[in-house]
Amino acid sequence: MESCGNSQCGTEKQEAEEAVLKEQLDKIRYKLLVMSGKGGVGKSSVAAYLSLALAKLGKQVGLLDVDLHGPSIPRMLGLQGVFGIGMDNRMIPHSYNERLRVISIECLLEDRDAAVIWRGPVKHGVIRQFISDVRWGELDFLIIDSPPGTGDEPLSVAQTISDASAVVVTTPQEIALADVRKSINFCRQVHMPILGIVENMNGFVCPHCNVETPFLGKGGGARTAEQMNVRLLGSLPFDPRVVQAADAGQSLIDSPNGSPFVDALGRITAEVLKLCPGDAKGGDGEPH
């Protein structure tokens, strides 16, 4: 049998890779890209806690950390060690619990403190592999934590997952709101539906008396949502216990006493579920 030409073999390989990618994505009902215009707004915390809250409500959830240069999800959830490889040569995600599976570049590094120095094309290929070459199984939600800004990683997600929707995280500060407007315009330019805005750090909650102080301002997220004609999914207060728990690789989601943060998270999660009903498939248009 004559071997095929290089271009034909390349085309067949690309078509096979696309078929595998599509097969994987078809098993995932909703794909949500958690993004922000700037760093330091608690985007990874929102991605992690939204994943935890959905899993606690019985949803099958995958949490994909594509912040390739600054991954933080494994440490926040207390996950360590490299991934296993199955008989089908696919990566086996870390299991936080029976309903939450996690993939991050950090779990492929022998040295967790090693710097990842990659250009755009390599990052694009890795993000595709994190979908097609991972044993995700059937998922209700894939939550994707991307780095701040509108660079390679969110663009790769938009190009790879045509039915992804964005959850944009901001703080009430005007400097953060200016950058979040860029994120919203990015989504519109790449035709990615925006599920809504989450306003993080909307007031400081004293861990002793639970009194809230608006140390970064108040209501900026709601004003931006109205100006940009997008939904406000809700607001989360800044709670030092969230930071302390993340540093210890733990979460407050199962705290017996609850907290204003966990209560607010519950309202945001309910809003997400209302916009992503369990009896409907994800689609190319705006979720409703």
Image: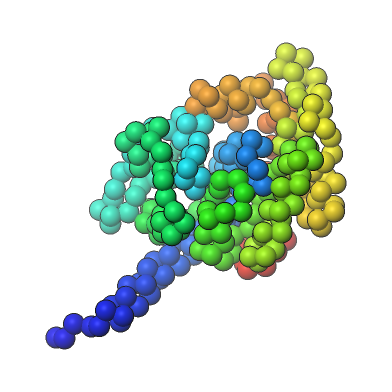
Name above or below for residue 37 compared with residue 160: above
In the rendered image, residue 197, in percent from the top left (x then y), is placed at 73, 48
In the rendered image, residue 110, in percent from the top left (x then y), is placed at 32, 36
Q: Quadrant of the C terminus?
A: bottom right
In the rendered image, residue 123, in percent from the top left (x then y), is placed at 44, 54
Residue at the (71%, 59%) spot, across then down: 185
Seen as rendered, the residue at the extreme left is 1
In the rendered image, residue 173, in percent from the top left (x then y), is placed at 78, 37
Quadrant assignment, res 245: top right
Q: Nearer the viewer, residue 15 or 185?
A: 185
Confirm whether residue 120 shows in the render.
yes
Residue at the (38%, 39%) spot, across then down: 107
Confirm whether residue 281 shows in the render.
no
Residue at the (75%, 25%) spot, across then down: 204
Colour pattern:
rainbow
Q: How many marks?
A: 0
In screen coordinates, is 161 left or right of 198? left
Residue at the (78%, 52%) spot, across then down: 231
Name above or below for residue 74 compared with residue 226: above
Q: Quadrant of the N terminus?
A: bottom left
Q: Nearer the viewer, residue 216 or 65?
A: 216
